Image (cartoon, rainbow, N blue to C red):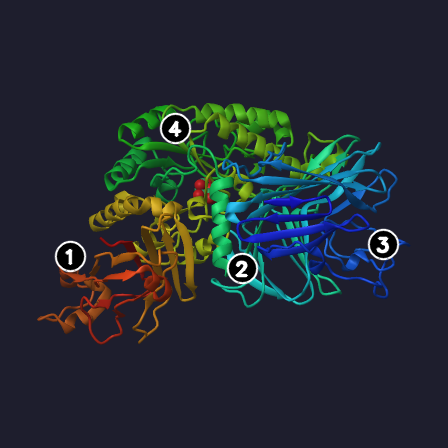
Amino acid sequence: MIKADGKVFFLNTKSTTYAFRVMETGQLEHMYYGRLINCDEPSVLIEKRAFAPGNTITYDDAHQDLTLEDVRLELSAIGKGDLREPMLEVVCADGSTSLDFVYDSYEVIQGKPEFKTLPSSYDETGKVETLNVTMKDKNHGFTLILSYSVFEECDVITRSAKFINTSEESVRLTRMLSMLMDYDHPGMKITSFHGGWTREMNKSDIVLPAGKFVNSSFTGTSSNRCNPLFMISEPDSCEESGDVWGFNLLYSGNHYSATEVSSFKKTRVVYGINPQNFAWDLAAGEEFEAPEAVLTYSAAGFRQMSLNMHDFVREHITRGPWKKKERPVLINSWEASYFDFTESSLLKLAKTAKNAGVELFVMDDGWFGDRNDDHRALGDWDIVNKKKLPGGLEGLSKKVNDLGLMFGLWVEPEMINVDSELYRKHPDWAIDIPGMDHSEGRFQRLLDLCNPEVVDYMIDRMSEVFSTPGLAYIKWDMNRNFSDYYSKYLPADKQFEVSHRYVLGFYRLLKTLAERFPEILMEGCASGGNRFDLGVLCYYPQIWASDNTDAVSRLAIQDGYSYGYPQSTYTAHVSACPNHQTLRVTPLESRFAVASFGVLGYELNLNDMKSEDIAAVKAQIELYKQYRKTLQFGDFYRHKADNIYQWSIVDKDKSTSVSMLMQREIVAGDQYLKINMAGLDQKTKYHFFGRKLEYNVKGFGDLVNTVSPIHIKQDSLVHNLVAKFVKMPGEIEDYVAYGDTLNSNGVKLVQSFVGTGFNEEVRYFPDFGARLYFVEKAE
Ligand code: GLA
């Protein structure tokens, strides 16, 4: 609910309040962002001033008490005494750079307006309100509209800003961020997510007593180096308690956030498009939209912060027919055969996959032009490789459909290889600087999406591909970072606009296709997670989280995503061992356990698997389908994440829950383990149980001789023969308990193997062992 009177503004959600006021001098003073409060006396929230401290700039002669450097603000620019990070910077026609924005007016509107140029959140509940505050620049007459949308139900407020050049002359924006907010104290903890290819979303914490911390990307995308998601918290906050503020941005290009502690010990946060290598010219009358920033506050630690973000993404970001629809279990051809396939090898894989319960077959890279490696053919989407696919896309699609599977396809529409028909025809369509050497990424170049003709062409080409009869799914890849920023379409003085114009062109391409083909399930990908953000999630509901399919690596990666993104948005595949990215060998059941906590798929040559492994895969898929609704759309809880990772997911109606734990490394003699749970109904009686599994006797090595009547040499023929017929029984876990007990205590599990004996009351739990547990309402 928004309470506004032109002097004071209170934005209340279910459990939070965000408040600011108009100062006597016209600036917006931030007052409060935290737990829901009922405040009709704002003076208790406002800092009191009588004299400005020494060595500061006072705002004007009439206000010697006021230095903008020591006020909590909603907006700040340079030039009027605030020496901290600004929200915007401009170069005016007269060369000056000082801005002096003061309050003009406000309006409250029902609902969530769409952006004109960028993706935006939306509302179907009818409960969202938006406050627009208009600010006017005293120096040049520019207009800035600060927007605040209040998503009451999920405790989220989104902020954005629009600059309108209401002056007579043109102006150059050199920084135009989406939001600025000041806390009144230093020493806060910043949690952000860093990495690179195959190691996305590694969580990092830093406490900031002084100075500045920047979380930004310059890959041209939201990046695997540094995801836009970050959190600020009181340093003693943990999963279940403490003040935590979460931030995210609906933007897929270079982003920037800076957290800065001022010399007066206030902590400032600014957030938006990265100003590095950015400028934007506005003629009189033109406007610029900054992307939407998402804010949430939790008084109950990181867990509640994540639940707020998850609800917001599910309800107000993802959209279209797949928003709430259960996602199919797929088989992807990439790690199964890379570029080396034929129609018949693909169909053989599809057939085995179908028998194992898979629902969607995806042909990955390698189906067009002469693409037998990654050096050529990107751009040639109209040239299907007939050597591999004699019946073309349509022929394969039909045969896959005839097997009873949905058909899906990989594309990388934003890219071009120099060795392609498209480049030979349109060298000017690639991003590179004429006459200069070009730095390549994965042997390919970016198409110049600043050029509307290129976007139109790609809309047509992709529309042809997407129109393949029987096509139900698209994997939209993007495999290189930006270099040699240059658009041949733009004049020299507009080259600073390339990175943002590219993003706008990309959004037009993606949005047009998403709207034209709403039934097609689209999955984003950028060498894994190099473009995992809320901007693209407005168009595709799921993203390939990482090219790393190793179950152990995936623990940290998926745990990282879970802070800001619901599990229905990140996909996870069971792949072969030794793993193709790490060469690590993990149990098949552990690979499944971890992958089933994202949107599950398989990416390996099922035809090369042992028959008992295929049978295991079949059982996994059957189990997954049984709990899929809970796993994909339930509330996600992280528990302890150290040597042992634990996650649990609870259905929205609290009737069902699935939990997973996985151990990275065995600790000798450590026999007791507990699985933690959360989110169950306190008063409901539940049945808790594990899976009944059997283990290979070879996992016990030559210990087999402690029970065998004859001596068995390890790895001998006899050993293999015994392993074929004798299985070690898995432990049994089966209990009944009330939700309050499970929420507070979890379940003490049977002991781990500690070298002194083994039976059904002992858990066989080697390195990388994992378990799934289920909770259902007891009869
Ligand atoms: C990228 C993707 C992979 C695969 C290959 C194909 O690396 O992340 O999943 O699609 O491209 O070239």
Q: Residues within 10 Å of mark 2 (few under 14, many from 20)?
A: many
Q: Secondary structure at mark 3?
A: loop
In the rendered structure, which disc, 4 or 1, sits on the residue that comes first in sequence? 4
Please tell me which residue lies in front, 522 or 717. Answer: 522
Please name whichever residue, 628 or 334, is drawn nearer the observer in this view of the structure: 628
Q: Is residue 217 above or below residue 713?
A: above
Q: Which residue is mark 2?
A: 299
Could you classify mark 1 by the number of other residues whose Cα lies within 10 Å: few (under 14), some (14-19), or many (20 or more)? few
Q: Nearer the viewer, mark 4 or mark 3?
A: 3
Which of labels 1 and 3 is toward the front? 3
The disc at residue 724 is 1
Cβ of mark 1 under 8 A from ligand 1: no
Q: CA distance from mark 4 to mark 3?
A: 62 Å
Residue type, mark 1 in image: Lys
Q: Kindly report the distance in space between the C-alpha atoms of the residues bearing marks 1 and 2.
A: 55 Å
Q: CA distance from mark 2 to mark 4?
A: 46 Å
Residue 558 in picture, x, y percent from top left: 44, 53
